[in-house]
Image: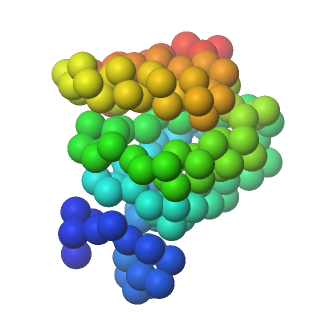
Amino acid sequence: MTLEAGPWEANAASDVRIEVQKRVWKVEDRLFMMIEVPVQTPFTLDVMFDRLEELAAGLDRFAYVVDLSGVKRPDARVREKLRQRVGKINQRLIHVAVVIGDNAVLRAVSKLAAFAVGFRSFSFHKSADEAMEACRRALE
């Protein structure tokens, strides 16, 4: 199955939900990875953040890497859902490292979105490895 065919909404088949959940995993203690689907929807954000919250349950602080290198620009519904979901975890969230590759436009849009969403600490990176190191430093 390919998630590139989205956008996926809440009435999507359970196998879509499982595939979206697989895009969020624990890298190590207090560090998580999210690879966004190409076309984000409030549904896909809920599935991904539900999984992140499940994995981070019981942690007083954590960080995550989010790979946005393959996404399309989110619409207003997605941005609002992102604000809501980040708001739920923001007190425990130490750092978010955003992978954007070499895309200058994505960097500019992501920077505006990061401020609007309310991230307290964030950084942008060309690769997931760089992003993970930034999270590790923030967690020290």
> Quarter-wise, where is residue 105 in the image?
top left
Apparent side of residue 41 relative to residue 28 in the rendered image (left or right): left
**91, above or below 15, in the image:** above
Camera-side residue of 80 and 85: 80
At a point 40% along the width and 86% down the height, the residue shown is 13
Q: Residue furthest front?
A: 76
Camera-side residue of 138 and 10: 10
Callout count: 0
Is residue 97 in sight in this rendering?
no
Is residue 73 in sight in this rendering?
yes
Quadrant that contains the N terminus: bottom left
Quadrant that contains the C terminus: top right
At a point 53% along the width and 21% down the height, the residue shown is 122
Apparent side of residue 22 relative to residue 92 in the rendered image (left or right): left
Residue 24 is situated, as x and y percent measured from the top left of the image, at 46, 53
Residue 55 is situated, as x and y percent measured from the top left of the image, at 63, 53
Apparent side of residue 86 relative to residue 40 in the rendered image (left or right): right
Apparent side of residue 33 relative to residue 117 in the rendered image (left or right): left
Camera-side residue of 44 and 109: 109
